[in-house]
Image (cartoon, rainbow, N blue to C red):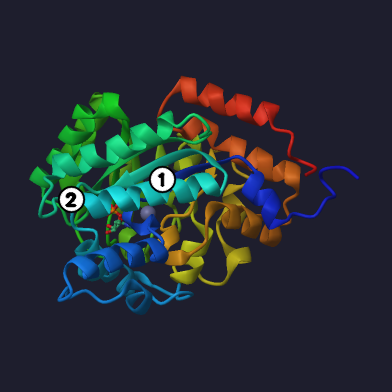
């Protein structure tokens, strides 16, 4: 039997070395981890006025849409992960989860956030410290880097602060800058100078792109493309002219199947996902989870879904992973490490 004719199993997609390029730190925290944090806080402070995560975000509930998704963070998860100890604990748990799922390269993104005991800068430093010690673990095949996000609700001054932090902590593992947040709010044009400065400084750029029809006007998309991003997240509501520009500029696309289906950001189901179109294009494609803590589909499951709904065999899945390599932000040394991992990997027939 050849590797192409063997059925795709979940154990295969777990063992496949995978590259995750679009994962929000806070959105990647599992409900169990949030529950642990809640339990510890409740034990220390019995009158804690935060609902048990297992009640507030019931296990199995994944149908968060654009209206219910963002308040989950602002009104709930940020109230729980609001100090150094919960941020350390949850960051470590997120890294462990990605590693256990067979991820070999992770670019995690987060929006710098001040808590009652951390400044935005110390929030970033805390996360970088956890990442650095995880990267150093001797039996760990996964290497993690950090992207700092500007939120669409930010002021120009706040966006500048994110960029300053990204530049200051570049040598400690920050590899890029992102634009995220509720696509229904904000005017992206106000961030043009900040992203132009990032570009001049040589910091890689990714942006959430055409997530909803309201954030997919020509004006917005042409503005975002003028920032010369190396990658784009979601890329849902794009017309042919924009697709051609993305292909001409060879911009990588970060595609999130489960998130888009559960949040009803696309019409139809998995087989209707625009991955079906992008996989035939020449640009780097990175299947990604976005918020595994909310949509409960780890990266191995995203590859399983892609195989199931687009009839991909084992070799095609490995090629798909490798296709993301040129769009990583950390540079040629990591690109080379990843190429070697795939060249040496002999799991096709396992
Ligand atoms: P954090 O940046 O680590 O706090 O991760 C959670 C944040 O990521 C949320 O508050 C949103 O601003 C952002 N985010 C997560 N998923 C999405 C998405 O699909 N679109 C836009 N922003 C997102
Ligand atoms: Zn996202």
The image quadrant that residue 72 belongs to is bottom left
Q: Name the one closer to the observer, 340 or 47.
A: 47
Residue tagged 2? 113
Q: Going 69% across and 53% down the picture, which residue do you hit?
A: 11
Q: Going 18% across and 35% down the picture, which residue do you hit?
A: 165
Q: Going 24% across and 49% down the picture, which residue do you hit?
A: 111
Which residue reaches farthest front?
A: 43
Residue 192, above or below 257: above
For the residues marked 1 and 2, what is the alpha-carbon distance in whole angstroms? 23 Å
Q: Is residue 177 visible?
A: no
**Residue 20: % across, % down:** 48, 44
Which residue reaches farthest right?
A: 1
The quadrant of the image that shows the C terminus is top right
Q: Residues within 10 Å of mark 1 (few under 14, many from 20)?
A: many
Q: Is mark 1 within 8 Å of ligand 2?
A: no
Decide if residue 284 is on the left or right side of residue 74: right
> In the image, which is nearer the foreground, mark 1 or mark 2?
2
Q: Secondary structure at mark 2?
A: loop
Residue tagged 1? 232
Q: Is mark 2 within 8 Å of ligand 1?
A: yes
**Residue 41: % across, % down:** 22, 65
Q: Name the one closer to the observer, 300 or 261.
A: 300
Q: Quadrant of ligand 2?
A: bottom left
Q: Name the one closer to the observer, 306 or 6.
A: 6
Q: Going 70% across and 49% down the picture, which residue do you hit?
A: 12
Q: Is residue 109 visible?
A: yes
Residue 224, above or below 238: above
């Amino acid at each position: 039997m050849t590797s192409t004719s063997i059925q795709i199993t979940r154990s295969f997609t777990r063992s496949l070395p995978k590259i995750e390029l679009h994962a929000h730190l806070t959105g990647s925290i599992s409900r169990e981890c949030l529950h642990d944090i809640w339990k510890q806080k409740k034990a220390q402070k019995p009158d804690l006025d935060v609902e048990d995560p297992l009640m507030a975000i019931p296990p199995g509930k994944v149908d968060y849409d654009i209206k219910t998704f963002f308040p989950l963070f602002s009104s709930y998860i940020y109230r729980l992960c609001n100090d150094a100890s919960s941020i350390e604990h949850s960051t470590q748990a997120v890294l462990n989860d990605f590693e256990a799922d067979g991820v070999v390269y992770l670019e995690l993104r987060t929006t710098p956030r001040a808590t009652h005991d951390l400044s935005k800068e110390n929030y970033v430093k805390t996360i970088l410290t956890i990442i650095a010690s995880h990267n150093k673990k001797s039996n760990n095949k996964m290497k993690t880097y950090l992207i700092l996000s500007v939120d669409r609700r930010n002021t120009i001054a706040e966006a500048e602060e994110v960029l300053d932090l990204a530049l200051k902590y570049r040598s400690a593992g920050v590899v890029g800058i992102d634009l995220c947040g509720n696509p229904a709010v904000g005017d992206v044009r106000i961030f043009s100078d900040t992203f132009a400065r990032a570009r001049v400084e040589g910091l890689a750029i990714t942006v959430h792109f055409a997530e909803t029809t309201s954030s997919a006007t020509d004006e917005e998309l042409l503005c975002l493309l003028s920032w010369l991003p190396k990658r784009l997240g979601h890329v849902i509501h794009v017309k042919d002219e924009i697709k051609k520009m993305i292909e001409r500029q060879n911009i990588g696309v970060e595609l999130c199947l489960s998130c888009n289906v559960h949040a009803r950001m696309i019409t139809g189901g998995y087989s209707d996902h625009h991955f079906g179109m992008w996989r035939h294009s020449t640009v780097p494609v990175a299947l990604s989870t976005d918020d595994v803590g909310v949509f409960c589909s780890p990266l191995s499951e995203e590859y399983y879904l892609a195989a199931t709904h687009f009839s991909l065999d084992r070799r095609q899945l490995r090629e798909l992973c490798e296709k993301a390599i040129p769009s990583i932000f950390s540079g040629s040394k990591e690109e080379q490490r990843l190429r070697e991992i795939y060249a040496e990997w002999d799991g096709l027939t396992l």
